[in-house]
Amino acid sequence: MDLSQFRREYLRDGLSREDLNPDPVEQFTIWFEQARSTNIADPTAMILATVGENGMPSQRTVLLKYYDQEGFVFFTNFESRKSREIAQNSKVSLLMVWLELERQIMINGIASKISTADSAKYFMSRPKDSQVAAWVSSQSNVISSRKMLMQKFGEMKRKFSEGRVPLPSFWGGYRVEPVEIEFWQGRENRLHDRFMYSRTETEGWDIGRLAP
């Protein structure tokens, strides 16, 4: 199928060096608040790219749950494919795409597990059915059927019907500490605005404009 005629111009906005906050986390906050205020569906969704031991990359969508100057945090099953690949190679890439604003943010960095206490704090804030589901899914592994999955979910709901659902030992959060953050703003004629923040040896940030 030829899709070459599917195209549109990006005319919404521009981005200049003078627009940028010297701190990329502060600049991220500015863009994130703008995305949230425009009622974009799932503004916290981001693509996480990891690399397996065979050198093959893999991607999936995760949700950003909080961030600060130390990094960007998401949660997952520690026995999943993404976790196995992070254990082998902690260098990862995150990509947030807000097409309604014609914007992307790419975050390259090092992933590491957060503390069990911090994982438990977030886990207890989840809806109870989501807590139960964390116990049910052997993430990334082959299963026989959805029926089997739902049967296991029912069993776990009954098991945890009273009292709190404990944090599974195989579930928790990762923090991606950024070494590079790129802000991309779509522009007319594909001459997009791109700025890359690169961490310096003094823990500051250099900012450079990239060719589109």
Image (tube, helix red, strand yellow):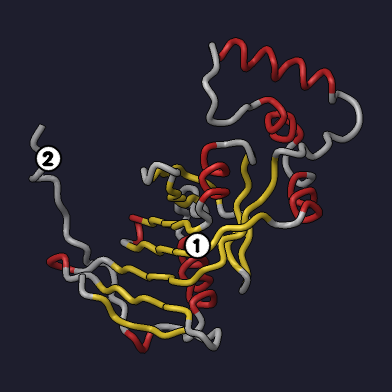
- Viewer-side residue, 84 vs 59: 84
Q: Dot 2 surroundings within 10 Å: few (below 14), some, or many (20 or more)?
A: few
Residue 111 in the figure: left or right of residue 181: right
Q: Is residue 40 above or below residue 83?
A: below
Q: Dot 1 surroundings within 10 Å: few (below 14), some, or many (20 or more)?
A: few
SS under mark 1: helix
- Viewer-side residue, 192 vs 152: 152
Q: Is residue 85 above or below residue 137?
A: below
Residue shown at the point (63%, 27%) measured from the top left = 137
Q: Quadrant of residue 18?
A: bottom left
Residue 49 in the figure: left or right of residue 148: left
Residue 3's disc number: 2
Residue shown at the point (68%, 12%) measured from the top left = 151
- Residue 189: x %, y % from top left: 12, 66
The residue that label 1 is drawn on is 37
Task: Tell me the kind of residue under disc 2.
Answer: Leu
Which of marks 1 and 2 precedes in the sequence? 2
Residue 191's disc number: none
SS under mark 2: loop
Task: Tell me the kind of residue under disc 1.
Answer: Ser
Residue shown at the point (62%, 54%) measured from the top left = 174
- Residue 102: x %, y % from top left: 31, 61
Q: Quadrant of residue 183?
A: bottom left
Residue shown at the point (50%, 48%) measured from the top left = 42
Q: Is residue 139 above or below residue 29?
A: above
- Residue 192: x %, y % from top left: 22, 70
Q: CA distance from mark 2 to mark 1?
A: 32 Å
Say which quadrant the C terminus sits in: bottom left
- Mark 2 vs mark 1: in front: 2
Say which quadrant the N terminus sits in: top left
- Residue 139: x %, y % from top left: 58, 31
